[in-house]
Every structure is written in structure tokens, then in C-alpha cells.
Amino acid sequence: MATTITTTTSNNAATYGDCVAALRTSLSFLESSVSTLGTGIADYPRLINVLKSVRHYELIPQPALVAAEASLRDEIGPAITTLLDRADAHIERAERRIEALRARSELQQGRLHSSSNAPASSRTSNNNNNNNSKGKSKAGAGAGRRRTETEGKLKARQREALQYSVERLELEVLQKERELRKRLDAAT
């Protein structure tokens, strides 16, 4: 009977040893799982803040959306019409101003051409008069030539200034048209 007890005890000890080994292996797996979970949930406080800032939108039924668009169109429509009328009036004013400046430029050019032709004829008559009258001096003729040169330079400057102002006004009209198109595109 003593042999049976020793064999039973040794069998129990071996079985208990296997149980303890299995328990230690389970504990090591459990510790590994806990450390893996710990690293996995370490970012949760930050994720909570990130997820709090996400906004959720509700869906709006189609009839409510159509009604909102119609009311917005009714509110904005008259203002857009007024703005378009103003823009058209401003463009027409600018076009009239450009035409007036062009006409003025042509008038000034006509005057320049007529004045440049007139001094040539008056010079020939003055030369004839100078040849006929011996009282005129050469210094007076030089001053007259300088005056006509100065007048020619002044008229050339005026012509350039008129051309510049016409070009500037045309650019302003183009800029206003671009702004109007942008506003219309933004409004629609």
C-alpha cells in the first residue's frame, strides 16, 4: 500500500506540476495581453478630444431645402437686379466718357494738324514779309521758331496724355466688368 501511495503522490505531484506550468504560461499570456491592451488604449484620451470636435450634420428634407432656396432667392433677387442696373449704368457712363475723350483727342489732333500746317504757310508769308521789310531782326525769327517748337512739344505731350487717359479708362471699364462678373458668379 505504501508503494501505491508513493506512486499516487508522485502522479499527483506530476499532475500538479503540469497544472502549475500551465497556469504560469496562462499568466504570462495574460500579462502580455494586458501590456498589449495598455499600449492600445494609451491614446484614448487624445482620441476622445479628437472625436469630440467631429460635427454631425442632420439631413434636411427636400421640401425644406427648396423653401429655403426660394426665400433666399426672394431676398437676394432685388438686390442683385439693383446691382446689375447700377453696373450697367456705370459701364454706359464709362463708355460715353471714353467716346468723349476719343472725340476730344481727335479734335486736338485736328487742331495740331491744322496748327502745324498753318505756321508753315504763315512762315512763308512771314519770310516774304521779312524779305520785303528790312526792319525785322534775325533774333526775332529765332524766338518765333523756338516758340513753335515749344508749342509742338506741348501739343505732343497733350496728345500723349489724352491717349493715356483713354487707355486708362478702357482698362477701368474692363476691370469693372471683371468685378461684376465675379460678383455675379459668386451670387449664383
Image (cartoon, helix red, strand yellow):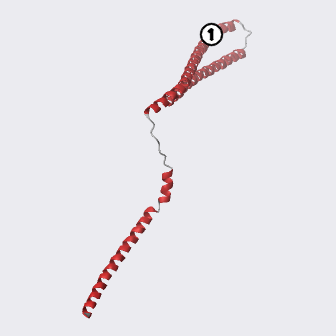
In the figure, is residue 57 to the left or right of 125?
Answer: left
Task: Where is residue 183? Give x, y as percent.
Answer: 53, 29
Residue occupying the far front of the picture = 1
Vertical placement of residue 179 versus 103, above or below: below
The residue drawn where x is 50% and y is 51% is 52
Residue occupying the far bottom of the picture = 2
Name the element at disc 1: helix
The residue drawn where x is 47% and y is 59% is 44
Give the quarter of the image for residue 104: top right
Which residue, given by chain and number where applicable, does mark 1 sit on? 118
Q: Hey, what amino acid is under mark 1?
A: Ala
- Please tell me which residue lies in front, 26 or 145: 26
Task: Where is residue 55? Give x, y as percent.
Answer: 49, 46
- Please tell me which residue lies in front, 26 or 120: 26
Vertical placement of residue 61 versus 157, above or below: below
- Please tell me which residue lies in front, 164 or 31: 31
Give the quarter of the image for residue 85: top right
Task: Where is residue 61? Give x, y as percent.
Answer: 44, 35
Local crowd size for mark 1, using a 10 Å CA cut-off: few (<14), some (14–19), many (≥20): few
Task: Where is residue 95? Give x, y as percent.
Answer: 56, 18
Give the quarter of the image for residue 81: top right
